[in-house]
Amino acid sequence: MESVLELDKAKPTILKIGGSVITDKNGELAARTEVINRLAEEIQKANVQRLVIVHGGGSFGHPTAQKYGIKEGLREDAQKIGFAETHHVMTVLNGLVMDSLVWHSIPAVSIAPSSCVITENGRIKTFDDTALKRLLAMDFVPVLYGDAVLDEKLGFTILSGDQLVAYLALKLNAARVVIGVDTDGLYDADPKTAKNAKLYMRLTLSELETVKSKLAGSSGVDVTGGMLGKINELTPVIAQGIPVSLVNAAKPNRTYKALIGDAAEGTVIKKE
């Protein structure tokens, strides 16, 4: 059976689709199905060899997780239904994403992080990636998402899609990471509130460190840290020499261009 894993040693691409792109984060359980369908079309058209997709929770995972304090861990039995509900609504959103991917003839297979990841104080401690690696070797497209997971110290917590992306990029020695957000890239201020916010088109790792202090948190309900949280998770990935592109996945063809390697408008961060 090991021969299956020898089929293709090409480095994978990791695509993160932000919850703020595929849901209305100011609503509750508000999926943007037309955006999900368009992104599936762009992914199909790009036809990337060895692709892993991770999506965020947006208005599905975050409000429930916040309501029950899931990220902070188990403190009372009443939170257990909150853990179950947070995981469940994430499977609902994941189901909408999967519907669209499969409808567009993408051989996508969902992997629930809660079934294969254990964290310790909120950080991934063990990740059984056997199935994920086998799926990749057979040219399937594994699809993961931010999830409520069990934690050795806290009982349970929230595992962000951003931490998943960074972990997988390093573990699988990814060729690149594409992050689809709801802004045109990385700015020196929040572009949703600051009219004169400047977009960074290219950044090195050392330049990134100098602009981190200017990064804003999320404008909606986000239990996983917003843009600064993303960048902090991705810094070790960039340090490893894996380039990261941030593009506006809410705008047509930006994700497609990033996936095929075109210079889509956005921010590209490289080690040097």
Image (cartoon, rainbow, N blue to C red):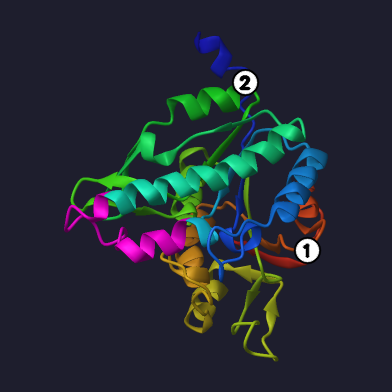
Q: Is residue 236 visible?
A: no
Q: Amino acid at mark 2?
A: Met
**Is the residue 224 above or below the residue 150 in the image?**
below
Considering every residue shown, the one lying at the far top of the view is: 1
In the rendered image, the vertical position of residue 2 relative to residue 121, given as above or below? above
Tell me the quarter of the image containing the C terminus.
bottom right
Which mark lies nearer to you, 2 or 1? 1
- Percent from the top left, x then y, of residue 64? 40, 60
Coordinates of residue 107 in the picture (x, y in percent): 68, 28
Question: For the magenta stretch, what is the residue range?
Answer: 61-80
Q: Residue at x 62, y 54 (%)?
A: 17
Comes first in the chain, label 2 or label 1: 2
Q: Residues within 10 Å of mark 1 (few under 14, many from 20)?
A: some
Q: Does residue 155 sit above or below 229 in this rendering? A: above
Q: Mark 1 highlights which residue?
A: 251
Of residue 265 and residue 44, the one placed in the foreground of this image is 44
- What is the number of the mark on residue 138? 2
Q: Quadrant of residue 78?
A: bottom left
Determine the residue positioned at 53% across, 70% down.
Answer: 227
Q: Please indicate, yes or no, whether residue 127 appears anywhere in the rendered image.
A: yes
Q: Say whether residue 229 is magenta.
A: no
Q: Amino acid at mark 1?
A: Lys
The part of the image, by quadrant, that contains residue 26 is: bottom right
Residue, x 76% and y 30% (percent of image)?
105
* Residue in the foreground of this view, choosing between 197 and 238: 197
